[in-house]
Image (spheres, rainbow, N blue to C red):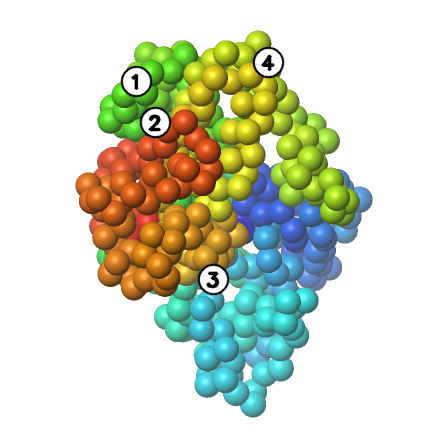
């Protein structure tokens, strides 16, 4: 995943850019970058943040990052923002999304015109590719519209120029962009909460395909929003930060609603309800409030010196290291029947190990309640590392065992029906493999109700394969 932040200010933008970008650190763990424009022109800095918090990497460079306009990005993939010189002039660009037809764009649209640098995995840098597409048109507006139109997958853009910052939301609104305003200027962000402590007030959330440009004085709409929305529902379930709001729905509130509706269909007889830190916690609070079963924290995540992505290269100790962040509270585990809520089950390995960890600490029973339905399809619209490879999904592996081999999309949709016999067989197969006392997934209709916006505006592809 990735997140970005941009600011145009009457004064130096450095402070706001630095902290506004840092507030997106939960969306990426590998690369971070900042680019500014000021009296001395452009300045850009990119760092590896895999084992180091964002702030510590850029602190010494802040004096050089002085300017009135700036964009920043946190990414799990390519290094960005990138700096470009073209017939449009010089600009910096950052993107969020996924380009499934990158090879086609290179071969058919940009053939013999542009040379690209490959990333370490052999792929073309997606942000560099978007910049090249934009450069195929006579101006930024037409270039951005062209890029949004031809990309298969998703694409949101921040583009920094000497005259202001362009912000363009994915044509189906799969990821958000929110505009903020204060007396000194404007900002644009993936996460709505990222600018509140900096003194900005929300102005608007861009609609699908909407393109705006802003400087320190004003914001202007260049392309009106479209009427078809398919925002990623997983943003509320897992990726979004609790203080964030998408389409008027707060992440933490949605998770309370999610847990509440999960509890209404459940009849588990347990002593306490707990959430897998951190994203499962709010779902568990909602479940506990509705069911009347006490909420508890039988294990705590130790985070002061453990960044989310931190994993020393000590292969013989990897399993132990992966659990060193989780500290048991034995008095809250021993002889207890626990109901544990996680945001989802992807491969299942980590949750199985957590369950074994609780049994080893004296738990009597461990009942698992994921906050979303079984993941049956790998996401093809966003770079979600949790579910990119379909055959890594525990639900798919169980289905193929039940069916005796690969299955069609139509058969998978039968397994997505929570009222079908095939669904029940799949759930039981997952439970047996992962050694849970009981397992009950959230229903898709209940999960969408927990969000509360028009279900037709939410992407549910990873659960039911419907586009």
Question: Is residue 100 or residue 463 the one in the foreground?
Answer: 463
Disc nearest the viewer among 4 and 3: 4
Badge 1 vs badge 3, beta-carbon distance below 8 Å? no
Residue under pointer 1: 290
Farthest bottom residue?
A: 112
Is 353 on the left or on the right of 51, as rendered? left
Quote the CA–CA distance across marks 4 and 3.
43 Å
Residue depicted at 19% across the width and 41% down the height = 419
- In this rendering, the answer to whether 235 lies above or below 296 is below
Disc nearest the viewer among 2 and 4: 4
Question: Is residue 459 or residue 69 the one in the foreground?
Answer: 459
From the top left corner, tell me how far across and down residue 332 is, in percent: 53, 12
- Asked whether the viewer can see residue 321, the reply is yes
Badge 2 vs badge 4, beta-carbon distance below 8 Å? no
Quote the CA–CA distance across marks 1 and 3.
38 Å
Quote the CA–CA distance across marks 2 and 4.
25 Å
- Asked whether the viewer can see residue 289, the reply is no
Picture disc at residue 98:
3
Residue under pointer 4: 330
């Amino acid at each position: 995943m990735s997140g970005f932040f941009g600011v145009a200010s009457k004064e130096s933008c450095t402070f706001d850019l630095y902290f506004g970008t840092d507030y997106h650190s939960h969306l990426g763990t590998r690369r971070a970058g900042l680019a500014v424009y000021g009296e001395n022109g452009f300045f850009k800095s990119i760092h590896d943040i895999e084992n180091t918090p964002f702030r510590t990497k850029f602190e010494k460079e802040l004096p050089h990052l002085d300017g009135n306009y700036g964009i920043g990005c946190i990414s799990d993939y390519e290094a960005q923002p990138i700096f470009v010189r073209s017939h449009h002039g010089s600009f910096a660009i950052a993107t969020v999304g996924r380009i499934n037809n990158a090879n086609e764009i290179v071969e058919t649209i940009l053939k013999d015109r542009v040379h690209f640098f490959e990333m370490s995995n052999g792929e073309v840098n997606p942000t560099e590719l978007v910049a090249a597409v934009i450069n195929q048109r006579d101006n930024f507006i037409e270039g951005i519209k062209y890029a949004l139109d031809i990309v298969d997958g998703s694409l949101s853009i921040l583009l920094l120029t000497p005259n202001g910052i362009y912000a363009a939301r994915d044509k189906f609104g799969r990821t958000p962009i929110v505009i903020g305003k204060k007396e000194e200027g404007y900002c644009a962000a993936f996460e709505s909460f990222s600018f509140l402590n900096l003194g900005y007030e929300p102005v608007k959330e861009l609609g699908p395909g909407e393109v705006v440009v802003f400087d320190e004085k004003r914001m202007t709409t260049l392309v009106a929003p479209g009427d078809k929305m398919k925002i990623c529902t997983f943003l509320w379930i897992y990726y979004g930060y609790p203080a964030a709001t998408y389409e008027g729905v707060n992440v933490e509130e949605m998770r309370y609603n999610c847990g509440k509706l999960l509890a209404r269909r459940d009849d588990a007889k347990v002593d306490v309800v707990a959430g897998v830190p951190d994203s499962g916690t709010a779902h568990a609070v909602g479940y506990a409030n509705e069911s009347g079963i006490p909420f508890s924290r039988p294990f705590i995540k130790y985070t002061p010196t453990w960044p989310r992505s931190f994993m020393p290269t000590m292969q013989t100790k990897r399993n132990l290291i992966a659990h060193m962040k989780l500290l048991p509270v034995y008095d809250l585990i021993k002889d207890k029947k626990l109901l544990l809520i996680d945001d989802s089950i992807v491969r299942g390995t980590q949750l199985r190990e957590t369950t074994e960890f609780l049994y080893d600490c004296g738990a009597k029973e461990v009942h698992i309640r994921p906050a979303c339905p079984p993941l049956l399809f790998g996401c093809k619209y966003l770079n979600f590392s949790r579910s990119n490879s379909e055959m890594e999904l525990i639900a798919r592996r169980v289905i193929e065992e039940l069916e005796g081999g690969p299955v069609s999309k139509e058969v998978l949709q039968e397994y997505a029906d929570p009222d079908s016999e095939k669904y029940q067989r799949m759930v039981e197969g997952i439970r047996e493999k992962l050694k849970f006392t009981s397992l009950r997934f959230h229903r898709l209709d209940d999960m969408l109700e927990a969000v509360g916006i028009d279900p037709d505006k939410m992407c549910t592809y990873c659960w039911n394969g419907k586009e």
